[in-house]
Image: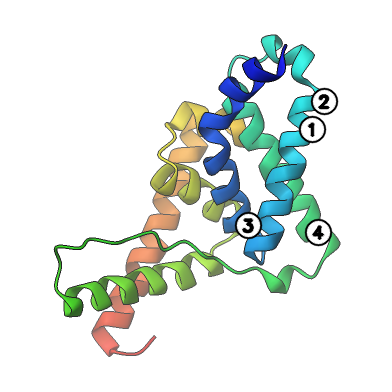
Amino acid sequence: MQQSEFINLVMPFKDKLYRLAKRLLVSKEEAEDATQEVLLKLWAKNENMGQFRSVEAFAMTMTKNFCLDRLKSKQAGNLKLVHSNYRDENTSLQKQLEAEDSVSWIEKIMDELPEQQKMVMQLRDVEDYDYDEISEMLDMKPTAVRVTLSRARKTVREKLMQKHSYGIG
């Protein structure tokens, strides 16, 4: 596969790779490094790209595995969830601050979820993958993906309700 073909194939989803890496790793720099490493590995495998049903799913799986390996080599306590691309210019400042606060609380709650629930929630609710794609990426049965996502959402919902009921989390 030529360089231009590779770029056309991989570049449309490189931002998803980065967001997944950023979700799992400590910093923006770590996520950028991880994304670059995965892209280099994909380039090294570019002759065999035709054998994969979904290059995107394969790349997301590579990113997940690379990040988890990196985390295993570091202290797992350093995980930090950073995902706040929520912006709407039409909302008032108060509503925007409330939305940012809610996003911040959801990030904190998601950060406390078990790794598998965090991954499934990221892939489904943030990256918008369907259940079959997530199932393939995480090597889980589609039913297990649905149950895991349901449990993750339930935990997030319950903790958010607690926070709003009591004022402080």
Task: Give the CA distance from mark 1 to mark 3.
Answer: 19 Å
Residue at the image point whose x is 51% and y is 28% from the top: 133
Residue at the image point whose x is 79% and y is 32% from the top: 41
* Label 1–label 4 contact, CB within 8 A: no
Circle 3: element type: helix
- Residue 20, horizontal then vertical, whole percent: 57, 49
- Residue 66, horizontal then vertical, whole percent: 75, 45
- Residue 150, horizontal then vertical, whole percent: 39, 49
Q: Earlier in the sequence, mark 3 or mark 2?
A: 3
Q: Is residue 135 visible?
A: yes
Q: Is residue 139 visible?
A: no
Checking the image for residue 108, the label placed there is: none
Nearer the observer: mark 1 or 4; the answer is 1
Pick the quarter of the image with the C terminus.
bottom left
Circle 4: element type: helix
Residue under pointer 4? 72
Identify residue type, mark 2: Ala
Identify residue type, mark 1: Lys
Identify residue type, mark 3: Leu
Circle 1: element type: helix
* Label 1–label 2 contact, CB within 8 A: yes
Checking the image for residue 41, the label placed there is: 1
Residue under pointer 2? 44
Farthest residue, direction right? 73
Q: Earlier in the sequence, mark 3 or mark 4?
A: 3
Task: Give the CA distance from mark 3 to mark 2.
Answer: 24 Å
Of the pair 62 and 40, the residue shown nearer to us: 40
